[in-house]
Amino acid sequence: MARWTCARSRCLSVIAATLVLGVAAFAQGVEYKDGVFRLLNYSGQSPESALAVYAAGADTPMLGTYSKEGDTLVFRPRFQLSSGISYRAVFAGGTLVVDAAPATAPAARVEHVYPSASVLPANELKLYIYFSAPMSRGEAWKHIHLLDDAGKPVPLAFLELDQELWDPGNQRLTVLFDPGRIKRGLVPTNEIGPPIVEGKHYRLVIDRDWHDAQGTRLVESFEKAFTGGPSDRTPPDPKHWSVIAPKAGTEEPLIVDFPKPMDYALLQRMLEVPGVAGKIEIDRDETRWTFTPDGPWKSGAYRLIADNLLEDIAGNHLDRAFDVDLQKAVPAPVSSKTVSLPFSVR
Amino acid sequence: MRKVISSTSFRLVAAACLTAAFAFSASIPGLTSGKVQLKSAGPIAFGPDGVLFVGDSSAAAIVAIDTRDNKAVQSAAPIDIKGINEKVAALLGTSKDQILINDVKVNPISKNVYLSVSRGKGPDAVAVLLRLDGAGKMSEVSLDNVDHASASIPNPPAAKGEASTRPTYVTNSNPRLDTVTEIAYVNGNVVVAGLSNEEFSSNLRTIPFPFKAEMASSSVEIYHGSHGRFETQAPVRTFVPYTIQNKQYIVAAYTCTPLVTIPMSDLKAGAKVKGSTIAELGAGNRPIDMIAYKKDNHEYILMANSARGVMKVTTDHLEQYKPITAPSDIAGTPYQTVAGLTGVVRLTSLDDSNALILTDSNGAMDLRSVPLP
């Protein structure tokens, strides 16, 4: 059996050189170049029996299409060869082994987990985990651990959907706490209670065995320590927001302070100043939203528009608590999808 | 010059091309011929005449594909494939840890099995549909020239401003995405359950099929009333079409675990719908798939769960069950756990007498048929 190891980009020269030296292999040989396998001096047999390509130790050949170019049988794999895997091109004269370029060194890490606060309500609804590079799907729940103050895993804390809630680039994962344990009156809540208990200390641990999109482990593990706070079942009330208007003629930011942390992702698209372009900044543990215009403010009347679907970190919308106690308050009929907060620039 | 020569895969391509050559207009209304480029392949479901619906979350779309796989077969051949994930990986030229089997469904006409697969796990993963025929041969469903149509799932716009504090590695593309968790064809509509990766919404969408260009999907907000006191938005995790006294319902499992019935007639655009609770499944459980069937003149729902095995729920005269409205109310619908079915990660109907299960035991996945209990 001949074996040629080739990084994808340098494969051609390595194989070509070897084929030149190996007359027998050349006479009835196979070459791999630019993602295509070629069986030279092909004639006779059916293409599948003349040349088949197998991934790793598989006994089923991989999908692809055959064509004939002169007296060469060409096999184009349906998919690019995967990094780190050995492929066997089996033909009458032997086997050509192609090692696709190995996985790269670890490069991905957890950049941040939102909410940023160190006290999270007992009915905290979700977490956003930001990674520095695209990640692999399908293994999140093996690598996200919520540990109590004794270091023991909090069981069944999260809604472990097999369809993981990633952004399109696989760099942000949204993790929902199990809604059945947050909502009041449900069997899970009554049986095992909420995942976070007020006054207790926790560590969210993301272990480094999570693979990035290249199949490489994280550079390091990640931890976020926090303490359980009281449940929050009160909708955020824009009347309690502090809106600090900028001065006319300046590029000072419009500053909005919230009395409690708000949802990081939603703050980026559910607050706006119509007609004014600018940049948003979110800081102070998601209790402050600042908006810096691209040009100086003109004096006049403005409005800050908040979408009613904006949530705090316990999933309470502006117009509705996450779970409404119908014996105490019937949700008011929603008359508008937004809340308007006027401010003046002078 | 390349010359195409005979091979199994080439015969398939040639046959598809030939079919397309004679199919200037698609045989199923609303579909057009051409290449389908799936960005992702998640939940799948069969509709009428061998039409396969594919939930493409990355493209925010439901794609209908005419499989032309409509040769009727009464009952399916038994299926028992050990290491199905290894076989899929081999076919796709990679290792089993580089594929995801996202869904498994059976064409109710041909009884051929369809798998929705990701080759790769990153954002560049390739969506692949595979077909397993009655003889056990697995092949790729070519999407190069098929009759198809697509319906979009409206996705809220990207961030209003440019968030300068956004980490530099985050591109300006819209990070918000609805992830489809289940789809089914119900009386002329594709019903789509999903979850947003941002706002906690409980929208259930219905899209009339054939899709029409001007027809936007309509969505309803699903609420759960817990014991008549607490009311919350309740995203549907999975559901199955079900008929009660000649009226079309869906039986749905919420992400917060209760099993409910929802009349299809309630799913009108903009409506706020509260499901009627027929069972509460308890803590730590996550319903995965459900099928409805009849056996010995009784009606059942078989439900695969993450923690509580496969449950057989008796659903005779569902209309007579009083909805659970109080914590002390333990009536609900009776259910029992089916012995011997462990590690089930996908469950679907194979034929009138058998179910098809995909099991996972520490990474070793098997696909096998089991008699309906």
Image (spheres, helix red, strand yellow):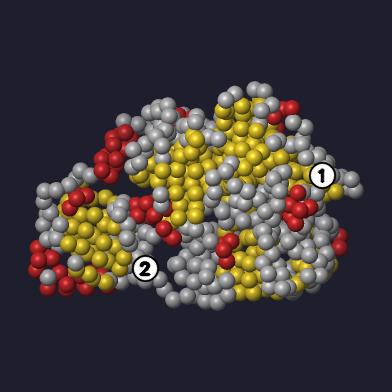
Chain bearing tag 2 is: A
- Residue at 19% of width from left, 50% of height from top? A49
Find residue B22 and report its image quarter: top left
Find residue B301 and report its image quarter: top right
Residue type highlighted by circle 1:
Pro
Q: Can you name the residue that lies furthest to the right here? A: A328
- Residue at 65% of width from left, 55% of height from top? A159
Q: Can you name the residue that lies furthest to the front here? A: B339
Residue A186 appears left or right of A140 = right
Measured Cα–Cα span from mark 1 to mark 2 = 55 Å
Query: Under tag 1, what secondary structure?
Result: loop
Q: Residues within 10 Å of mark 2 (few under 14, many from 20)?
A: some
Return the residue nearer the eye: B148 or B341: B341
Residue A267 appears left or right of B134 = right
Residue type highlighted by circle 2:
Gly
Q: Residues within 10 Å of mark 1 (few under 14, many from 20)?
A: few
Find residue A229 and report its image quarter: bottom right
Q: Position of residue B239 (x, y in %)?
A: 61, 40
Return the residue nearer the eye: B249 or B322: B322
**Disc number for residue B214:** none
Return the residue nearer the eye: B328 or A208: B328
- Residue at 78% of width from left, 63% of height from top? A122
**Disc number for residue B327:** 1
**Disc number for residue A84:** 2
